[in-house]
Amino acid sequence: MTIDVIVPSKRISRFFSRKAGTYREHARFQRVALDRLAQLLRPRLGQDASVVDVGCGIGLLPEMLGKSGMRITGIDVAFAALRSFSLTGRQAVCADMDRLPLRPAVFNAAVLASTLQWSADPAGLLRSVHGIVRPGGLLAFSCFTTGTLAEFITARDKVAGISSAAFIDMTQLKRLLAGSGFAITTIEIIHRRYFYTTAAAAVRSLSSIGATAHDGERLGRSGIAALYEEYERRFRTADGVPVSYEAAVGMGEKAP
């Protein structure tokens, strides 16, 4: 299967492409959320359904849906990730999710799995997704919410002397969904907390899935050492060094 390229941001594309080889091993929570989305979607879709996976990454969704006749189109900014996705025999498009290069009303369902929180314009993205879904079609979403990576963000901001934006809160998310054009039928919250032997191991795991990306300056070697020290000092428990996740998972329907 070929990969169509629609000129995404080179910097962002390169960053997430570098993480494609390590994503599957370290994306523990992302798989939990995606598995729940697949459970919600599976009974609602026929064998020949047409699905667009916006921010598809390496292609975990086709594995989890398990319906071989389903036509799944993957869109992602990371070309290296799409190489893995295309090996499933699905159509892959390398493009910025905030500028979807797709015709209107062509899909039975759209999936935004751990994607919405990375959009520069989430309201605009939801409107675009609404446009490419057929009348009566479905939206399945998971979105990181406030509390995700709280330990890492707190330690990093302390060391870097910044106050970075936290993940979206439920009030904001519900407001976005209310303006999406979809009638939200299901929404639930998933929490997980994973423990690592050291702060360095926790941060390396986060880096392996691209979760350490932010708009500020990169920490140098001394800054990274200080980050590890702060993370350990503030958050180490008897179980180890924690990484917390929280996500809203749900579905919506487009009017017939």
Image (cartoon, rainbow, N blue to C red):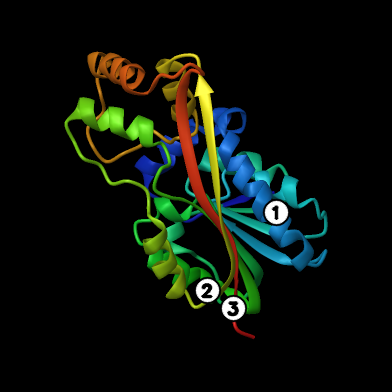
Note whether 23 is above or below 184 in the view shown: above
Q: Quadrant of residue 237?
A: top left
Element class at badge 3: loop
**In the figure, is residue 77 to the left or right of 75?**
left
Residue 38's disc is 1
Residue under the point 58% across and 61% down: 250
Residue 102's disc is none
Q: Residue furthest left?
A: 161
Note whether 223 is above or below 94 in the view shown: above
Q: How many marks?
A: 3
Q: Does the rendering let one see residue 89?
A: no
Q: Quadrant of residue 27?
A: top right
> In terms of sequence position, does the residue under pointer 2 or pointer 1 come before the other?
1
Cα separation, mark 2 vs mark 1, equals: 19 Å
Element class at badge 1: helix
Dot 2 corresponds to which residue?
130
Residue 167 image offset from top left, x and y in percent: 37, 48
Residue under the point 61% across and 28% down: 25
